[in-house]
Amino acid sequence: MLERDLKYDLEEVNRLVRNRLSPWWEDIQNHVCQAAAEPTWEQLPAAVLAIYRYLGQQRGSSLRMAALFKMTHLASVIHESVRDDEDGQIYDRDMQFSILIGDYIYGSILKLLVEIGADSLLDVFSDTIGQINEGLVMKYKLDSAPEEILARTRASLYQAAFTSAARLRGLSPEATTWYTKLGFHMGMALEGHDLPELGAEMMNHCQISRDLFAFINQGRTTLSETALEMLILENLNQGLTRAAI
C-alpha cells in the first residue's frame, strides 16, 4: 500500500464516517477536533487498512472496517470527555448530549456490522467497548498504571482490528490468537511512543511485535512492501515503531 494510496483510502474512511454520522456531524465537531488532535485518529484506521489488506480483504471491506474502528474510537473520546461533578463538570444539556451521542455511535457501530454481514464480529466489538469503558474507569477512578490504562483503551482497538481481520479471513482459532497478540503489542507500541515514562515497556512491545510477525510469516517468500510492513516502515514513520517490524 503506497503512501498516496493510503492517503486516499484514509480520506475515504473519513467520508464514510461523516456519512454514517451525518445527522449529528456538525453537533459533534468539537469532539471530532479533539480526537483529530491525537495520532490515533489517523494511526488506527491506517493499521486497520494494513491488516485487512495483508490478509487479503477487498478494498471496500477494508474501508468499512476502518470506518467502524474510527467510529469506535470517536465514541470513546466523547465518553472520556464526560466527567463527574467532582471534576468540575456540571450535569447540563451539553454533558447529557455527549453521553447520548457516544451511546448512539456505539449503537450505530453494532447496527452497521449487521448491515454489512459482519455480525459474527459483534462479540469482538462489544468486548472492546467494554474494555475501553473499563480502562476509563481505571484512569479516572482507580489511579491505575499508564500501561494498564493504555492496554484497555487504545491498544484494545488494535487488538480487536487484528482479531476481526483474522476471523473474517476464516483463519483457525490458533492462528487468530497469534494475530490478536500481534495487534495488541503493535497497538501498545504505536500508541505508547508519546509516553516517555513507558519507554522501556514500549520497546519490549516492539520486540514482541517483531517476533510475532516473523513467526506468523513463516513460509512466505517475501515480505517487502506488504501493507503491514509499510504501516511501520513508511506510513507512520516513527522512530520507536520502526523497531516493531
Image: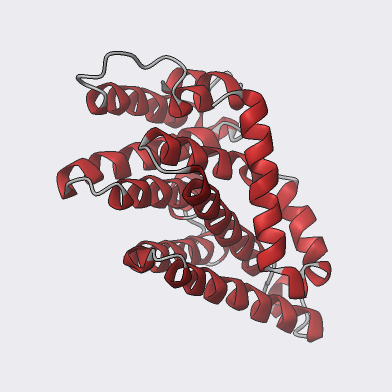
Residue 143: where, in percent of width, then height?
A: 52, 58
Please name whichever residue, 122 or 116, is drawn nearer the observer in this view of the structure. Answer: 116
What residue is drawn where x is 47% and y is 33%? 189
Do we see residue 88 in this rendering?
A: no
Quadrant of the drawing holding the C terminus: top left
**Number of marks in the rendered image:** 0
Do we see residue 129 in this rendering?
A: yes
Q: Is residue 205 above or below residue 78?
A: above
What residue is drawn where x is 51% and y is 69%? 112
Please name whichever residue, 43 or 150, is drawn nearer the observer in this view of the structure. Answer: 43
Residue 139: where, in percent of width, then height?
A: 54, 59
Q: Is residue 103 left or right of residue 215?
A: right
What residue is drawn where x is 38% and y is 45%? 162
Q: Is residue 186 left or right of residue 211?
A: right
Rendering quarter of residue 220: top left
Q: Is residue 106 left or right of residue 162?
A: right
Rendered image coloring scheme: secondary structure
Q: Is residue 5 above or below residue 11?
A: above
Please name whichever residue, 210 or 202, is drawn nearer the observer in this view of the structure. Answer: 210
Q: Is residue 74 above or below residue 196?
A: below
What residue is drawn where x is 27% and y is 14%? 221
Rendering quarter of residue 46: top right
Residue 2: where, in percent of width, then height?
A: 59, 23
Residue 217: where, in percent of width, then height?
A: 26, 24
Please name whichever residue, 63 or 211, is drawn nearer the observer in this view of the structure. Answer: 63
Quadrant of the drawing holding the N terminus: top right
